[in-house]
Each structure stands twice: as structure tokens, then as C-alpha cells.
Amino acid sequence: MGNETEALHILIVDDEQDIREGSQRILTRIGFEVSLASRGDEALEKLADTQAAILLLDLKMPGMDGMDVLARVKKKYPDVLVIVITGYATVETAIQAMKQGAYDFISKPFEPDQLRIIVNRAAEKFRLKTKAQQLAREQRRTLSDLATEQSRIRTVVESLPNGVVVTNNDGQVALMNPAFRQLMGLNVDFEFGQPVDAYIQDPELCELVMDISKGKYIDYEDIPSYEFSLNDETYLLAEAQPIIGRKNQCLGAVVNLVDITSMKVLDRMKSEFVAKVSHELRSPLSTIHEQLAVVINDMVEVTPKNDRKILARAKEKTHGLISLIGDLLDLSRIEEGVICTEPQPVKVDELLESIIQFLQAQAKSKNQTLKLETQATDLPPIQADPLALESIFGNLIANAINYSQEGGDITVRIDMAGINLRVKVMDTGFGIEEKYMDKIFERFYRVKNEKTRFITGTGLGLPIVKELVTSLNGFIDVESVSGKGSVFTVLLPAGDIDS
Ligand code: ADP
């Protein structure tokens, strides 16, 4: 139907040629597009082809009567505004035409100005009406788009196999899906709107969700994923994130819950299997190792040199296997939580002193210096199993010796960092490339390069260290520069711990 920038189309229907053409001139000059018809039927035909906005209609024409034309136009083209041209001030006909739906009228004879005013008024009315219709259409479309979008998202969330719960920034539940209800054992009548702890039975997770909802986490990466179990039967992994609004404000939190029970069961089975196999292998291997030692000891000078070499290698390999089994059994014990069952106060500086004394010979054999630095006096003891601490620092210091060249320096420093006891094991050795930094804590991972090729190991030392530090509620970190050296930092909470 045309818009504001387009010229509106006007159809003039009059049997008098002068009026037709005169009006056409006046209206074309002020920017309208004009077409002409001299009869009613011709006018109806032209209306079908042109998109006329306004019809100037003479009521007195031969053939089809103007009133008739008006009735048909109103029926077929209700948006077209009809201005009737009445002959010689016949007010009555004008009124009748208005009743039939004409928009306005003009009486013959008329001045050009009169025509301009009346047609401009009609044009304005037409434009406003078209605009309003367009706005209404757009609004209908946006609303229906929105409604479709919302129901689409709702359907997706409802059908997710993971449990999803959304809170507002007061930590009240605003949305949850059927999987969440099922995992939490909530029936269908359980309504939204209550604080999250009414829905999730784990206080620590609720606290985390509350903190996220209230915008306490700015950096997503700082948000820990959280594992918990329901009645020791179902294990769940929760991952939560803040919902950030357009103005960067925190609107609440969204939590995704995944059932990891089957993974946990598999993991447990795998650990039990490893523990069992390791256990079964240990005694025959130890026997072979001992017997090899006896045979080598008893060998006489005349035994061929090659035989002695072969047996010595076999003994070395069995020793490697025994230490691998030892590490595997240690890991299983840590996983079962056996290794830290009886914590007692341990003076870590004294413990480090004795480990260093024990490993001093090994360092000396590589012309390395190995020393302990303590600045603080009276360091508080750590509540822990002494064997666990020995394993942590023994492994780190042995690594520092192993992965440093002849003549390197190894320094163990102990001090306090806030409420934590901090131990740094620093070496001037091979260092670790950035890309291996996380990998070295994975089981069996060993960096293989020219320098480490001939160093024997199991790749289980650091995983054991990490498990033990975590079980003591501590933290381990490594900084290293390839070719320059490494610093392993362990933080352990001083004072009472609950585990
Ligand atoms: P292992 O020493 O038995 O190989 P670990 O788990 O203790 O197993 O260490 C894994 C890997 O990390 C090592 O193979 C080594 O490449 C690297 N690494 C550990 N400590 C150091 C260190 N102080 N300097 C350089 N590399 C190290």
C-alpha cells in the first residue's frame, strides 16, 4: 500500500474531462501519482491494477452510479479512502455518501486549494493508518517470535538428560527441569521460588550456588566443579555458572547436574583390580629379585662376563617393577583413604631435615648441593600422617635430584604463607616445558627427551604427591623454566584439619 517515502496513488473518476485533467495537474504538482477514469466500471478495473490510496469519485456519472461504485469499492478495497465529488452543493448526497463509508467530500466547482487541502488531509490519514497497521503487524510478529523462542527453549531444557536448575540473584529457584526433580527426589508439585537449599540436600553445593547467584564469582574459571553423593548410592557432578545480564550484572546462577555413578563404579572397580593385581605380583617378584641377588652374589670370577651382565640387568628390571607396584599400591591406599587415617602433629622442618639427610648421598653422587632453608623459627606442626608427608617431600626432593644435571643446586625452603605452611623444593635442573606442566601430575606420564631418557621412573610419583596433598586439604603448584630449573610449592593448612 505504499509508505511514507513513496508517492501515494490517486485515482480520479469523473465523466467531465476538464475536472479530471485539471485535478490531475494540481495533484501531480504536489507529488501524487494520478491515474484517470471516466466511468464507474473503468474505475473498478483500474483499482484492481493500481494500488490507489485515494479515490476521487464523482457521484453523478453515466452508466454505473457513483453510490454503487462507492459501495463496491468499500467492500473490495476497504483501505482506499474515497473522497466524493458532489455536484452543485448537494449536501444531502454528500451526507448519504459519508454514511456509506466515504471519507470526505468536495463540491463542484472547487478551487485548486480546496482540492489540495482535502486530498492532503486524506493522504495524511492514509499514511498514519498504514503506519499503525504496519506497527501492529510487527508487534504481532515479535510477540509470536518471542513466544515460539520461549517455548522452544523450555522444551529443550525440559528434555535435557542432565539436571538443570536456575536461581535468581537471591538464590531462589526460578526454574528446574524434570531430570533435576528426579535426581533430587522432588515430586512434580514441588514449586519454584524457595531458596536453593530447599531443593538440594548438599549444604556445600548450596553455599556455592548462593555465592554464584549473588555475583561473588567474577571469573568463571575460579568456580570449582563439585562432586557429591546422595545416600552414598548416586554420585553427581555439579557445574555452576553465573547468569550475566545485559548491563553486566549477575542475574543468578545456572547449575548443571550430571549423574556420574557409573563412572565412579568403574573407577572403583579399576582401582580394586589394580590393587589386587599389584598385590599378587609383589611377592613373586620380590622373590625373583632376592634370588637374583643371591645368584649374582654367589657368582665366581669364571662366570662369563655376559651372563653376569644379563643377570644384573634382570635384577635392575625386577627392582623397577617392584617400585612400580609399590607406587600402585600407595595410590590405591590413598584412594581408599587409608593412608591418612591417623593424623598426628608433625614438625615438618624436622621431617624435611631427616629426608634431606637420607637423600644427601644421592645428591653428592651427582656433585649436587642439597640444603634446607628455614627463616621462621617455631613453625606450627601439621596434623597429618607422617608417612604421607614423607612420601610427598621424599618424592619431590628425589625428583629434583633426578631431573638436575651434575653439579646442580637443590634448595628446600620452609616458611609460613598466611595460615598455611609453605614448602618450596627448588632446583637448577632441566626444568619442564610449559606444555607438560599439567600433564606431569597425570598417572604414568613421563616427559621424554634427551635429558630424561636414561632416568628410570614410574610416572606415578607426582600423582601420588598430588593425591596426598589434596587429602590433607593442601595445594601444590609448579613453576618451571625449561633449561633453568623448577620450583614445586606445597601449601598445607597448619593447625587442626577435619579429615
Ligand atoms: P617419575 O619421576 O617416576 O617419572 P613423576 O610423576 O615423579 O614420575 O614425574 C613425572 C615427570 O615429571 C618426570 O618424568 C619428569 O619428566 C617430570 N619432573 C618431575 N619433577 C621434575 C623436576 N624437579 N624437574 C624437571 N622435571 C621433573
Image (spheres, rainbow, N blue to C red):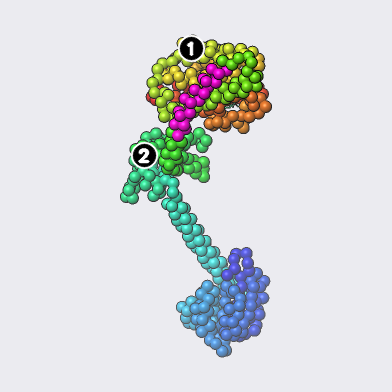
Mark 1 or mark 2, which is nearer the start of the sequence? 2
Q: Nearer the viewer, residue 144 or 400?
A: 400
Label annotation for residue 450: none
Prevalent SS, magenta region: helix
From the image, tell me which residue sits under label 1.
Answer: 350
Which residue is depicted at the point 32% across and 50% down? 189
Q: Position of residue 480 (x, y in %)?
A: 61, 25
Q: Residue furthest bottom?
A: 63
Say whether residue 278 is magenta: yes
Let me know if residue 33 appears in the view: yes
Which residue is depicted at the point 65% across and 82% down? 18
Establish if 377 lies above or below 252. above
Which residue is depicted at the point 45% across and 34% down? 273
Q: Quadrant of the N terminus?
A: bottom right
| Residue 458 figure quarter | top right
Count residues near mark 2 (Cα–Cα under 10 Å), then give few for <14, some for 14-19, many for 20+.
few
Q: Which of 143 and 131 is in front in this view?
A: 143
Q: Where is residue 125 in the image (x, y as percent from the top left)?
A: 54, 68
Q: Nearer the viewer, residue 469 or 276?
A: 276
* Disc 1 secondary structure class: helix
Say whether residue 150 is magenta: no
Magenta stretch, residue numbers:
273-296
* Disc 2 secondary structure class: loop
Establish if 13 lies above or below 123. below
Let me know if residue 396 appears in the view: no
Q: Which residue lies furthest to the top in this view?
A: 377
Q: In which quarter of the image is the C terminus?
A: top left
The three-letter amino acid code for the residue at tag 2 is Glu
Which residue is depicted at the point 34% across and 45% down? 185
The three-letter amino acid code for the residue at tag 1 is Glu
Label annotation for residue 233: 2
Q: Which of 195 and 24 is in front in this view?
A: 195
